[in-house]
Amino acid sequence: MKTFREYAASAAMAAMLCGLCGCAGMSQRGQNTAIGAGVGGVAGSVLTGGSALGTLGGAAVGGVIGHEIKK
């Protein structure tokens, strides 16, 4: 039986993959920012046990890191 955390992680990953489909017309920097925010949000959620503040903080940090890659 799956726990709530496993369901939340699966749902977040599915939402991120669906969101990445809309990145086709974006610049490389925009794609990196979106991917970084998605990965950071999932990581922040997992590390803080599903905390909304941890998810938002992870998304913000991930977005900044993704934006700065290959500057």
Image (cartoon, rainbow, N blue to C red):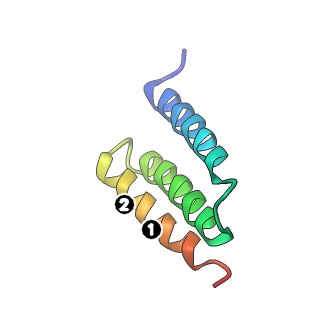
Q: Which image quarter holds the N terminus? A: top right
The residue indicated by pointer 2 is 57
Amino acid type indicated by mark 1: Val
Q: Quadrant of the C terminus?
A: bottom right
- Estimate how packed mark 2 is, as few (under 14), some (14 to 19) or many (20 or more) residues with alpha carbons within 10 Å: some
Q: Position of residue 49 (x, y in %)?
A: 38, 43
Label total for image:
2
Percent position (x, y) of residue 51? 32, 45
Image position of 16 (left or right of 64): right
Measured from the top left, where is residue 8 in percent x and y? Answer: 47, 32
According to the image, label 1 marks what residue?
Answer: 61
Position above or below: 12 against 33: above
Horizontal and vertical percent for residue 55?
39, 51
Residue closest to the eye, 24 or 2: 24
Picture quarter containing residue 34?
bottom right
Identify the residue at horizontal 44%, vertical 58% (top origin): 59
